[in-house]
Image (tube, grey):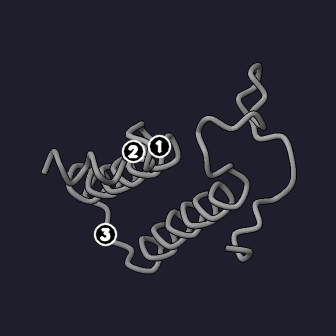
Amino acid sequence: MKNFIGQLLNDGHNQIDEQALISLLGAAVFLGLEIYSVVWHGQSFDAFGFGAGIGALLGATSAGFGLRARWTPDSSESQDIDPVTGRFIGEINDRNSR
């Protein structure tokens, strides 16, 4: 299980991907709060609300990964990184040219 979570959080350069970490923690908190409301407070399980919530979580996660893949340079040693903010400076990666 530890290897599986480690692979989920790996960004390809053997570093932790913050977007994946936030997504995993968000999903765990979402499921924990759902269990808490049903088990401890005795509220009825709202399948539609649960589906809408998990759908929003997955959509936001997918959008974050897509934007990150599009705007992050391929090389971790690229000179297009602002040393102050750590953000990519430059044009959108043209991944179709390869």
Mark 2 or 1, closer to the camera: 1
Q: Which residue is mark 3?
A: 44
Q: Are the two marked residues, 1 and 3, in contact with CB atoms closer than 8 angstroms?
A: no
**Outermost residue toward the front in this view:** 98
Foreground: 28 or 17?
Answer: 17
Mark 1 surroundings: few (<14), some (14-19) or many (≥20) residues within 10 A: some
Q: Amino acid at mark 2?
A: Leu
Separation (CA) of disc 3 from disc 2:
24 Å
Q: Secondary structure at mark 1?
A: loop
Separation (CA) of disc 2 from disc 1:
12 Å
Q: Amino acid at mark 1?
A: Asp
Residue shown at 22%/49% (left/top)? 40
Q: Secondary structure at mark 3?
A: loop
Q: Which residue is mark 1?
A: 17
Above or below, comparing residue 56 to residue 41 in the picture: below
Question: Relative to residue 42, is residue 49 drawn left or right?
Answer: right
